[in-house]
């Protein structure tokens, strides 16, 4: 059954500020979700930003109170220094970022995020990871290898929400895992053709067309942003039809990883989590 959605793109919410718990809570309190006559209506600061038809099995998740509870608990394990809150169409996301650390002389910051949707486009997710930063602060890329998610079903989401909160105690263990995973990449050289093959085909040999587009973007990034111009012919032909025809080359695994995840810097963190795992699993399989 096709369900109707209405969005109000001119009402996108974007907040990027220094962290202040009281101000974050005040911003979160401006969200409201209510169901009226089979419609889930999402508003921010009394402005409607999305409405969508929902079924009786849909669980109307309280993004505000869940985020506030996570905010209160996570401060036991790290010190947020800034926060970002975004609501676009039916997707809401909050990121808490802080506590810098260095891996191989590169600056990183710890991060936790929550992504929710009130248009049924995404499952609820909580994500833990690292932000790789420029020296003057802006994010270059994100690594998210710890991700908890669940769809908005009345039968399963309430119990899953509790498990999200219970797992916060492992925050620094999760961060240590991220650090070790990134450190382990630096001494590994991998074949770009083997890498492409490892993520481009499913178990039956069928091509993921969406991945083929991502490989095309990766090749251009390596050529123009990472100075692989002499390998232009290889890196711009990482397609299923050409992988056995191009001249192969070895690339440092950490460099390749960084270039790949940079492609998703501006996506929400549920997508970054998926792509972070995809590329790490591909590298480890070679």
Image: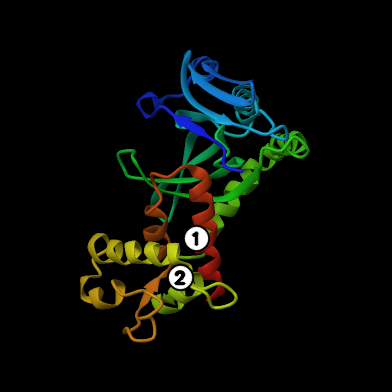
**Crowdedness near tag 1: few (<14), some (14–19) or many (≥20) residues, C-alpha within 10 Å:** few
Residue at 32 percent across and 45 percent down: it is 134
Under circle 1, the secondary element is helix
Question: What whole-number distance in Å separates the C-alpha atoms at marks 2 and 1?
Answer: 8 Å
Q: Is residue 196 visible?
A: yes
Residue of label 2:
187
Give the residue number, with chain letter if any, for mark 1: 183
**For numbered disc 2, what is the local secondary structure?**
loop
Image location (x, y in percent) of residue 186: 44, 66
Give whichever of 176, 34 is nearer the camera.
34
For the residues bearing labels 2 and 1, Cβ distance under 8 angstroms: no
Q: Is residue 281 above or below residue 164?
A: below
Q: Quadrant of residue 258?
A: bottom left
Can residue 94 be seen? Answer: no
Q: Residue furthest front?
A: 1
The structure residue drawn at horizontal position 52% and vertical position 74%, both measured from the top left corner, is 206
Numbered circles on residues, count: 2
Depth order, front residue of 7/188: 7
Observer-nearest of 63 and 136: 63
Q: Which residue is at a point 28% across and 64% down the rendered structure image?
A: 220
Which of the image's four quarters has the N terminus?
top right
Q: Is residue 218 above or below residue 110?
A: below
x, y (%) of residue 179? 53, 53
Q: Compared to 170, does 83 lie above or below?
A: above
The x and y percentages for residue 6 are 47, 30
Percent coordinates x, y for residue 149 in the rendering: 64, 44
Viewed as shown, does residue 119 lie left or right of 259? right
Mark 2 crowdedness (10 Å alpha carbons): few <14, some 14-19, many ≥20 = few
**Location of residue 229 (image quadrant):** bottom left
Colour mapping: rainbow
Q: At 31% from the left edge and 84% from the top edge, which residue is drawn?
A: 247
Which label belongs to residue 201?
none
């Amino acid at each position: 059954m096709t369900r109707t959605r209405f969005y109000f793109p001119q009402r996108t919410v974007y907040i990027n500020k220094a962290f202040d718990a009281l101000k974050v809570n005040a911003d979160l309190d401006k969200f409201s979700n209510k169901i009226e006559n089979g419609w889930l209506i999402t508003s921010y600061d009394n402005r409607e930003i999305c409405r969508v038809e929902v079924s009786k099995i849909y669980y109307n998740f309280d993004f505000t109170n869940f985020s506030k509870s996570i905010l209160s608990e996570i401060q036991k394990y790290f010190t947020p220094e800034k926060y970002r809150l975004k609501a676009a169409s039916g997707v809401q996301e909050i990121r808490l970022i802080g506590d810098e650390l260095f891996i191989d002389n590169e600056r990183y910051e710890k991060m936790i995020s929550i992504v929710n949707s009130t248009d049924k486009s995404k499952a609820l997710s909580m994500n833990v990871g690292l932000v790789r930063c420029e020296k003057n602060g802006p994010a270059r890329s994100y690594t998210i290898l710890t991700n908890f998610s669940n769809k908005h079903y009345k039968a399963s989401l309430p119990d899953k929400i509790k498990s999200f909160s219970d797992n916060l105690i492992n925050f620094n263990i999760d961060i240590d895992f991220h650090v070790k995973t990134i450190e382990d990449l630096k001494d590994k050289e991998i074949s770009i053709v083997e890498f492409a093959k490892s993520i481009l085909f499913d178990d039956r040999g069928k091509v993921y067309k969406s991945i083929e587009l991502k490989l095309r973007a990766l090749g251009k990034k390596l050529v123009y942003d990472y100075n692989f111009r002499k390998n232009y012919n290889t890196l711009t032909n990482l397609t299923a039809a050409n992988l056995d025809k191009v001249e192969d080359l070895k690339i440092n695994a950490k460099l390749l990883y960084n270039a790949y995840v940079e492609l998703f810097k501006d996506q929400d963190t549920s997508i970054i989590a998926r792509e972070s795992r995809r590329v790490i699993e591909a590298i480890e399989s070679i």
